[in-house]
Image (cartoon, rainbow, N blue to C red):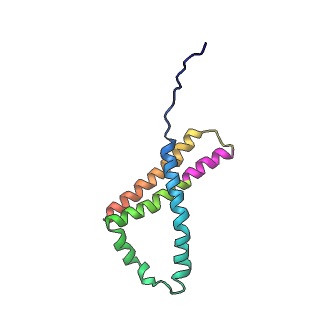
Amino acid sequence: MLENKEKTYTRSHEPVFWGLFGAGGMLTAFLTPVMILITGLLIPLGIIDKGNFNYQTIHSFATTWYGASIVLVLVALPLWHTLHRIFHALHDLGIKRGRDWQQVLSYGFAFAVSVFVFTLLLQIL
């Protein structure tokens, strides 16, 4: 006789971290080459005026709500991506002992730095 067994699924927090990982990876992949191009070639060659990237201009941009939001995203998401990659690299290297602590430390550090950047940006607004 066939028994009707219902599958029980356990909830995981992993999709949240994969979402942050994917967003940070996409942001890093698209913006890092552009930042290298601008700061490494276009400004030194004089194609872009370096007055657009001085302290006063960047500070005035970061002190607006949308500028602070962009700075937070540019700092936090690549950090989540990096720490998620480090966490899974430890697993791939066979360091499986203390997996829960590795998870708490890596994601906890990313969360703590994200909150720290958020509070710094709130102070300059």
- As drawn, the residue found furthest toward the bottom would be 46
In the rendered image, residue 113, in percent from the top left (x then y), is placed at 45, 55
Quarter of the image with the C terminus is bottom left
Residue 41 in the image: x percent, y percent? 56, 80
Q: Residue at x 52, y 52 (%)?
A: 21
Residue farthest toward the front in the current orientation of the protein: 1
Q: Residue at x 54, y 43 (%)?
A: 103
Question: Is 88 part of what is drawn in magenta?
Answer: yes
Question: What is the span of residues highlighted in magenta in the rendered image?
Answer: 83-93
Residue at the top extreme of this rendering: 1
**Residue 99 picture location, percent across and down:** 59, 40
For the point 36% across and 69% down, which residue is it?
A: 62
Based on the picture, tell me whether residue 87 belongs to the magenta stretch: yes
* Place of residue 110 in the rendered image (x, y in percent of width and height, measured from the top left): 48, 52
Is 40 displayed left or right of 68 in the figure?
right
- Report the side of 66 relative to 15 (left or right): left
Q: Nearer the viewer, residue 5 or 86?
A: 5
Question: Can you tell which quarter of the image residue 124 is in?
Answer: bottom left
Is 123 placed above or below 88 here? below
> Dominant secondary structure of the magenta stretch?
helix
Q: Which residue is drawn at the image coordinates 64% and 47% (left, top)? A: 90
Decide which of 123, 54 is in the foreground and name it: 54
User: What number of labels is visible?
Assistant: 0
Quarter of the picture holding the N terminus: top right
Position of 123 with respect to 5 (left or right) is: left
Vertical position of residue 96 compared to residue 25: above or below: above
Whether 111 is drawn above or below 57: the answer is above
